[in-house]
Image (spheres, rainbow, N blue to C red):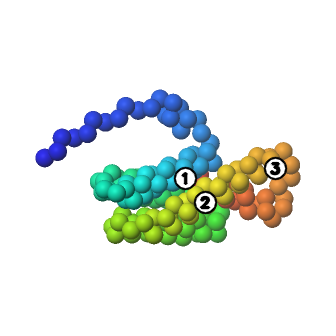
């Protein structure tokens, strides 16, 4: 029997950052975390002598984050956007599970690419929304951006 690992002390800076973040910033933090853990899992799998336990732990963390991203949207606010994002997150989750089971880099590389693309898109959306915050958001693109931004608050 292996001894239990000591629990990491909570990071007070991270806790404050999370507790004071807007829903948009929280979503960005989740995307960054999913990408970071997926890359860590990839690094372990690609090593000359892979540490399969570390890889598994990292990929499981990425999977849990993707599930959180998928389940924490509110479909009543923007059903079409939520439907598309749910399909994307389901696909990314499947890729992460496949990579974790087969220990193949192909599905993992695709998952990392899609997470990174989603993160970059989210950052652009947040920047555009901030730039237009003082202006009239009656255009179609602005409405789509706002729908995506409001789709994230947790369902009641």
List x then y, in percent, for residue 48. Answer: 34, 57
What residue would you read off at disc 2?
118
What residue would you read off at disc 3?
132
CA–CA distance between discs 3 and 1?
A: 23 Å
Query: Counting residues from the N terminus, which is met first, the one under dot 3 or under dot 2?
Result: 2
CA–CA distance between discs 1 and 2?
A: 8 Å
What residue would you read off at disc 1?
31
Q: Is residue 138 left or right of residue 93?
A: right
Query: Counting residues from the N terminus, which is met first, the one under dot 3 or under dot 1?
Result: 1
Residue 135: mark in rendering: none
- Kindly check if marks 3 and 2 are in contact, taking CB atoms under 8 A apart as contact: no
Q: Secondary structure at mark 1?
A: helix
Residue depicted at x 13% and y 47% = 1
- Kindly check if marks 1 and 2 are in contact, taking CB atoms under 8 A apart as contact: yes
Residue depicted at x 55% and y 35% = 17
Residue depicted at x 80% and y 47% = 131
Mark toward the viewer: 3 or 2? 2
- Is 48 in front, or is 69? 48
List x then y, in percent, for residue 15. Answer: 49, 34
List x then y, in percent, for residue 109. Answer: 49, 64
Neighbours of disc 1 within 10 Å: few (<14), some (14-19), many (20+): many
């Amino acid at each position: 029997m292996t001894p239990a690992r000591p629990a990491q002390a909570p990071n007070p800076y991270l806790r404050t950052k999370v507790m004071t973040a807007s829903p948009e910033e929280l979503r960005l933090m989740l995307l960054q975390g999913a990408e970071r853990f997926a890359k860590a899992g990839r690094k372990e799998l690609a090593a000359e002598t892979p540490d399969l336990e570390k890889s598994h732990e990292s990929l499981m963390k990425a999977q849990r984050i993707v599930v959180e991203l998928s389940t924490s949207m509110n479909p009543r606010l923007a059903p079409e956007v939520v439907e598309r994002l749910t399909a994307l997150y389901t696909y990314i989750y499947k890729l992460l599970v496949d990579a974790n089971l087969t220990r193949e880099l192909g599905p993992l590389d695709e998952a990392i690419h899609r997470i990174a693309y989603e993160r970059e898109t989210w950052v652009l959306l947040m920047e555009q929304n901030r730039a237009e915050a003082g202006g009239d958001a009656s255009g179609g693109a602005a409405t789509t951006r706002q729908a995506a931004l409001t789709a994230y608050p947790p369902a009641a």
